[in-house]
Image (cartoon, rainbow, N blue to C red):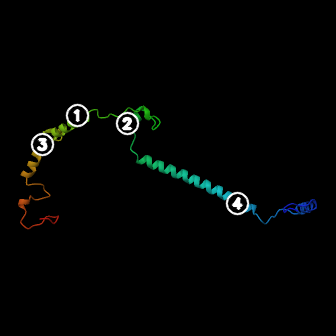
Amino acid sequence: MLEGQHTPEQESRIAAEHEASEHETSDVNIRAILWFLAALALGGLVIQVAMWWLKEALVAREKAASPPPPAIVEREGLQLPRDVGKLPSPRLEADDRRELAELRAYEKRTLTSYDWVDRERGVVRIPIDRAMQLILDEGGLPARQPPAQRPKGARSKEGRQ
């Protein structure tokens, strides 16, 4: 007879033995498994709530640290990033060489001309060359002595001669 095959008498005897046996109650503790699953579900819920709280805290911190949206967003009532297509295109430099030349000309005019900064307080802007000459005429900057007035061999605060 081949191994693993039973005669009809053997099979009826095996079936009778199996019918008489019941399941083992001591092998698996169903109550412990159910408590473990309940604790696992509760732990998962606690973690989900903690992650939601953390996300809300980080979003609030990011919102507080972010600069306010551009004025056009508030004026037009846009919702970013959804309405980003409704924003006007950026104002790019059309002729950067010309604009740079204009900027340098403006800076040169500012540094070489007299003008009122605040007329009510009596604050004026003077050319930078004139300002430097006035400082030298008054004896230099108050924090330093001109090198010619320092005694020979005296060291400055930095330790240089």
Amino acid type shown at disc 3: Pro
Q: Which circle's residue, 1 or 4, is located before the other in the chain?
A: 4
Residue 158 or residue 102, whichever sits in front: 102
* Mark closer to the chain start, 3 or 4: 4
Q: Amino acid at mark 4?
A: Trp
**Which residue is located at x 45 percent, y 38 percent?**
81
Q: Earlier in the sequence, mark 4 or mark 2?
A: 4
Tell me the element at label 4. Answer: helix
Q: Which residue is mark 3?
A: 127
Apparent side of residue 66 relative to residue 161 in the rendered image (left or right): right
Q: Residue at x 51, y 49 (%)?
A: 56
Do the numbered discs 1 and 2 sit on residues whose CB atoms are within 8 Å?
Answer: no
Whole-percent x, y for residue 93 in the image: 29, 34
Disc 2 from disc 3: Cα separation: 37 Å
89 above or below 5? above
Q: Nearer the viewer, residue 84 or 63?
A: 84
Q: Which residue is mark 1?
A: 98
